[in-house]
Amino acid sequence: MKKFRYVFFLSIPLFTLWFCTSSSSVKEKGPDNSMQTDSLKPGIKHVAVLELFTSQGCSSCPSADGLLDMYSNKENVIALSFHVDYWDRLGWKDPYSSKEYTERQYKYASALNSSVYTPQLVINGENEMVGSDAKRIDNTLKKVWSQDSKSDISIEDVSLNNGKATVNYVLTGNSGNFLLNIALVEKKTVTSIRSGENGGATLNGTNVVRTFKTISKPGEGKNTYVIDVPKDVDVKNISVVLYLQESNNKITAADQAQITM
């Protein structure tokens, strides 16, 4: 695990990297396959959104990336991989990294009073933990699945035209001053790392965020949003994730859908 002290975002580029330390205190285990979601109430989606902040330049991250892939196959889980950019100066530039995703991680750190490190996992905007700590992830998921939601979002369809994805969705329930996050993700990625801490390795990614947008105060009912599709992706390998987030960062509803070809 690579930790960084929390400082004002404008001082990220080099200053925070000097505080990088490694830790092996977390035992890496697979997710709890005994977890069940049979108690879910009809018509209510208890979806857990897992936001993993990771980097191809971090030697502690591949294990968390693999664990995220395992959780992505579970019902009522939506997994997202945000590649941060502060590792790009340390030997390998992550092709999926973005300053925007680093900023999102720092905002979470401020709200949750936590450190900034990789791999860091945030579940439903309220709980942060080491991304390879399967036991803590399992326990957090059980709590999330036991909660009721007063809102719901459902993607009706996603179509592609001229390099843009048109998303038709329905938002119901209490959306008040919520934010609607829209992520276009590359479902599977494979990268040969030529330098840095993971030099010589081949790394796999799951639901790697390629485009991310946020809408303030989304309207209820049927809506449409158009999002750009990167030119370097296979359209058969992308999907769209929508998730509703309160002003206190709590995620209350989410859905994921593939593009209709």
Image: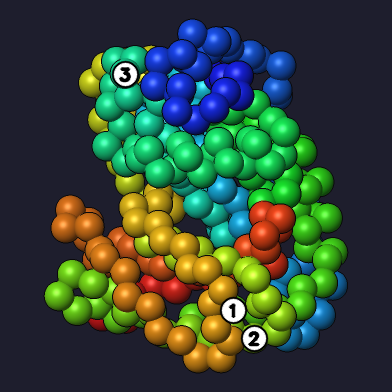
Which label's residue is closer to the chain start, 1 or 2? Answer: 1
Image coords of residue 56 (percent x, y): 38, 29
Q: Nearer the viewer, residue 98 or 147?
A: 98
Q: Which mark is residue 89?
A: 3
Q: Is 194 on the left-hand or right-hand side of 42?
A: left
Q: Nearer the viewer, residue 218 or 73?
A: 218
Q: Nearer the viewer, residue 191 or 115?
A: 115
Look at label 1 and name its amino acid: Ile
Q: Quadrant of the N terminus?
A: top right
Q: CA distance from mark 3 to mark 1?
A: 39 Å
Image coords of residue 155 (percent x, y): 49, 81
At a point 81% along the width and 55% down the height, the residue shown is 142
Please identify the quarter of the rendering in which residue 253 is found. bottom right
Please identify the quarter of the rendering in which residue 204 is found. top left
At a point 40% along the width and 15% down the height, the residue shown is 14
Vertical order, 206 against 132 (above or below): below
Under tag 2, what secondary structure? strand
Which label's residue is closer to the chain start, 3 or 1? Answer: 3
Look at label 2 and name its amino acid: Thr
Image coords of residue 151 (percent x, y): 70, 78
At a point 46% along the width and 13% down the height, the residue shown is 15
Q: Which residue is mark 1?
A: 153
Q: CA distance from mark 2 to mark 3?
A: 44 Å
Q: Quadrant of the C terminus?
A: bottom left
Look at label 3 and name its amino acid: Arg
Please identify the quarter of the rendering in which residue 55 is found. top left
